[in-house]
Amino acid sequence: MRIGELERRTGVSQRLLRYYEEQGLLEPVRRPSGYREYAEADVEKVGHIRNLLAAGLSTITIADVLPCMGSEGGRLIADCPELLLDLYRERDRLAASIAELSTALDTLQAVIATAPPGVAEEAARLPVPQ
Amino acid sequence: MRIGELERRTGVSQRLLRYYEEQGLLEPVRRPSGYREYAEADVEKVGHIRNLLAAGLSTITIADVLPCMGSEGGRLIADCPELLLDLYRERDRLAASIAELSTALDTLQAVIATAPPGVAEEAARLPVPQ
DNA sequence: GTAAAGTCTCACATGGATGTCAGAGTCAAG
DNA sequence: CTTGACTCTGACATCCATGTGAGACTTTAC
């Protein structure tokens, strides 16, 4: 598929899709015209990229991780214990963040639960701000 | 404690500690001289901030989440409908963040799991960067 | 009381992920 | 063939988290 369709199917702008390519995260083939041709699997790949970026990983790290996903990944990681160390660190970092957010969520729920009866119904009737 | 000590104990630069204050994440009191005076609890708070930033949250979001962490926040009461709506939204955002990070974590776990036996031990013997 | 270390504010710089725009080439439909 | 939609490259702009440095004031140690 061409870049327009990938944009539509992923919700990621063409600008970013090209940027990801520049960073080595995607490598669409080129038509004679110069147009990029993406594989079906790139839709999912872009999803992973977005998710890992949102989780605070850099494109550099993601470039290391991506090739290890999918069927043939094990062999890559075998040759590179340092990558594994990096992954451990990222994993621990993420786990810590999740733990913090979870306690925050718990607290938030507790605060919500203190709402006197009736207030929730009142809130539900409030106009939704844009 | 003053900013230098907080810097030492958290490893976060003075520049950033002041920036976090500007963003409403910290509110040290001021000495007559103008020097910032931080509370003991701020050490932990800065830890939370760093974690959440590393997880990709913005300072704005963190400012919303922080009051829900640790000892504070226990005494908040949700009694007005507008506030309650805000809390709902915040809860949903938080839950979405957690879900996002969780799938990222799953991804990393999956990649790590593809490492053939032996590589982990090899990695463990690697020099820890600083 | 003086020197050194700590702190203040303010301003400018940087790097990474993004947006936006302009000019030129490509393709498909009438 | 022409028109309109799509794509290309490249440049510039923006936002945010961060670094760095200057010049002035405060605190600490001698």
Image (tube, coloured by chain):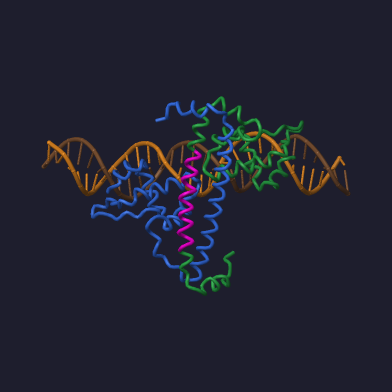
Chain colours: A green, B blue, C brown, D orange
Q: Is residue A59 magenta?
A: no
* Residue at the (51%, 40%) spot, across then down: A91
Q: Is residue B122 left or right of residue A5?
A: left
Question: Magenta span covers which residues?
Answer: A90-110
Q: Is residue B59 left or right of residue D28?
A: right
Q: Position of residue B14 (x, y in %)?
A: 34, 44
Decide: is A87 above or below B52: above
Residue C26: quadrant of the picture: top right
* Residue at the (61%, 37%) spot, across then down: A20
Question: B71 or A34, which lies in front?
Answer: B71
Question: C12 or B119, which lies in front?
Answer: B119
Image quadrant occupied by the N terminus of chain A = top right
Decide: is B3 above or below B65: above
Q: Position of residue A64 (x, y in %)?
A: 57, 32
Q: Position of residue A118 (x, y in %)?
A: 52, 75
Q: Is residue A93 magenta?
A: yes
Image quadrant occupied by the C terminus of chain A = bottom right
Q: Position of residue B108 (x, y in %)?
A: 56, 39
Q: Is residue B26 left or right of residue C18?
A: left
Question: C29 or A78, which lies in front?
Answer: A78
Query: Total marks drawn?
Result: 0
Question: A99 or B8, which lies in front?
Answer: A99
- The furthest residue to the front: B117
Decide: is A101 above or below B116: below
Q: Give the overall secondary structure of the magenta segment.
A: helix
